Amino acid sequence: MATRKINEKEIQAATLSGVKYSEMQICRDGIAVIAHPGNSVGQLALEQLKKIWTGDYTNWKDVGGPDEPILVITGDQTSGTALFLRNRVMDDGYFTGDAECATSIRKS
C-alpha cells in the first residue's frame, strides 16, 4: 500500500520480478499546514506556501508576520504526501535544503 500512484521504476521492478500488481484507491489523504499557535500569520495562500517550502521566503515578515526566521519542517521527502505537495503546490519544485524532517527533530 502507498499514499501515491505506483511509479515507472516500481512497475518495471514488479514486471522483472514476475509480480502482478494492481492499483485501487482505498482512501484519500488530508493535508494540514500548521504554524506555531503564537504565530500571528493567520492565513497563507498556496503561492506563499510554495515560496516558504522552496526557500524563496525565509522570514515570517515576507508573509506579513513578525521579523522571525521560518523553520520548515517536513515529513519524509519520498512520501506520497511530499510528492503531492511538490506536484500540486510547488510546480514540481523541491523543498528547501534547510527543511528539517519531523522524524529527526528531538525534544529538548
Image: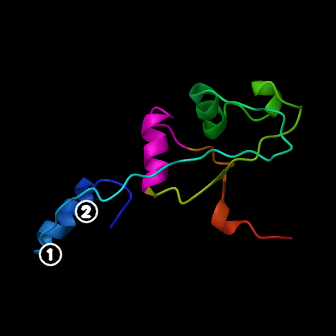
The residue carrying mark 2 is 10
Prevailing secondary structure class for the magenta stretch in the rendered image: helix
N-term mark: 1 or 2: 2
The image shows residue 75 at horizontal and vertical percentages of: 58, 58
Mark 1 burial class by Cα count in 10 Å: few <14, some 14-19, many 20+: few
The image shows residue 98 at horizontal and vertical percentages of: 69, 48
Residue at 68 percent of width and 67 percent of height: 104
- Amino acid type indicated by mark 2: Glu
Q: Quadrant of residue 3?
A: bottom left
Viewer-proximal residue among 40 and 66: 40
Mark 2 burial class by Cα count in 10 Å: few <14, some 14-19, many 20+: few
* 72 horizontally vs 14: left or right: right
Residue at 46 percent of width and 32 percent of height: 91
Q: Quadrant of the N terminus?
A: bottom left
Q: Quadrant of residue 42?
A: top right
Magenta residue check for 75: no
Viewer-proximal residue among 13 and 73: 73
Range of magenta residues: 80-94
